[in-house]
Image: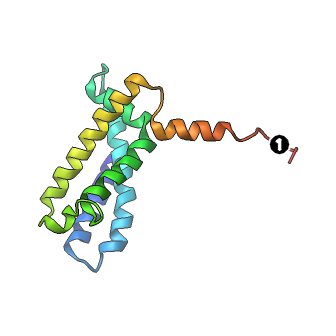
Amino acid sequence: MSCWGLGAGTLLHLVALSDPAFGTALRYLAAPLLMLGYIGLIGLLLDRTRRIGAVVRSLRAIGRTALSCYVLQNVLASVVCYGWGLGMAEQMAGKAWLAGLWAVICFFLIAGSRLWLARFERGPVEAFQTALLARIPNRTAGGG
């Protein structure tokens, strides 16, 4: 899964970047393939890990706060990139700064999720979701 996902997903992303005619279609095809590759890569990493170190603890923290991290990632990237925020996407030339931004956001999310989980059981969005779902009354299968 990791080889196919990372291989095909990376190849499709490179094609999409090199030829604007393929851009949108390949981008939305490549992203799910890359996601499968990342999942496979994490699985390989966890299968081969003998002891629980910082990487495994970080992956667990991201997994337990996945929805919160997803929302915060989008908010942070939007604030940094879009014109209603800092507008850096228009100011920065080239693609290299995007890799740096991605790395900074990833580091922030990893550190933030580990710090959050040291104090709380769930991520903030996960806790809100749990509280909201707890308010829904239980229904029986035939009770309507």
Location of residue 6 with respect to 82 vertically, above or below: above
Location of residue 11 with respect to 115 vertically, above or below: below
Identify the residue position indicated by label 1 in the image.
Answer: 141
Say left or right for 32 vs 128.
left
**Closest to the observer, 132 or 111:** 132
- Taking the view exactly as shown, the residue that stands out farthest to the bottom is 21
**In which quadrant of the rendered view does residue 78 lie?**
bottom left
**Closest to the observer, 25 or 88:** 88
Residue 7 appears at what percent x and percent y? 27, 55
Location of residue 140 with respect to 84 vertically, above or below: above
**Closest to the observer, 120 or 48:** 120
- Taking the view exactly as shown, the residue that stands out farthest to the right is 143
Q: Residue at x 22, y 64 (%)?
A: 87
- Taking the view exactly as shown, the residue that stands out farthest to the top is 51
Residue 98 appears at what percent x and percent y? 19, 57
**In which quadrant of the rendered view does residue 82 lie?**
bottom left
Would residue 47 be seen by someone viewing this image from the given angle?
A: no
